[in-house]
Amino acid sequence: MKLILIRHGLTDALEQHLYYGAADVSVNEKGMEALKALREEIDYPLGERYYTSGMLRAEQTFEIIYGKREHGVIPQLKEMNFGIFEMKSYEMLKDQPLYQQWITGDYVRNVAPEGESFEIMGKRCAAAAEKLAAESVDTVAVCHGGAISAIMSHYFGGDNPYAHIPDPGRGFVIEIDDDSHKALSFYQV
């Protein structure tokens, strides 16, 4: 089976280098135009089942790429919740002691105050991916960069949990063995 993971389109928050995961922001106009251009350029892979994280930016991206196709929502595929740092940039936060504690040391396991850690988000996303893989049906999920990178790290390892964050509107196709549910290979979309 194939697990097709597509990142949502460009947002103002991304362009402004803000931490945003739980914030339900939309794809901006530039992002919508870029997604429409990508749709003409790329043959986006199709699946037998379709899902989004349920966040506005994922829903908008899904509709631009796949139209009004029926799909489900898997909230476990949401981006990391940055807690009190949501919708703020490094520049806005750099002098705050709580922020310095969060970014210092183990950035994978440090929990954002009132939010979660990359590790917690990664386990949540990996569990959702495992459940989809167990269904042995080609599946498309439009979700978030951190979620995609966490799933890729779960299946393929690596030292940097952020190594597999695709550009907006891009993603990965993971080939998964139907019997063992183990990831075999991947390629970029």
Image (cartoon, helix red, strand yellow):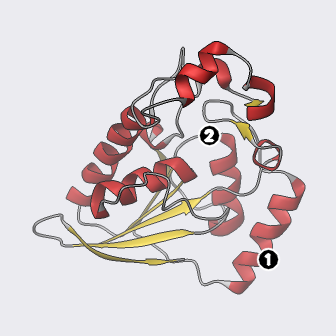
Residue at left offset 89%, top offset 56%: 29
Q: In which quarter of the image is the N terminus?
A: bottom left
Q: x%, y% of residue 157?
A: 30, 60
Crowd around label 1: few <14 · some 14–19 · many ≥20 (10 Å): few
Residue at left offset 41%, top offset 50%: 150
Residue 94's disc is none
Front-most of residues 17 and 4: 17
Left or right of residue 179, residue 147 in this image: right
- Disc 1 residue type? Ala
Q: x%, y% of residue 186?
A: 37, 76
Front-most of residues 135 and 101: 101
Toward which corner of the image does residue 97 lie, by quadrant?
top right
The residue under label 2 is: 55
Left or right of residue 173, residue 183 in this image: left
The residue under label 1 is: 37
Left or right of residue 82, residue 105 in this image: left
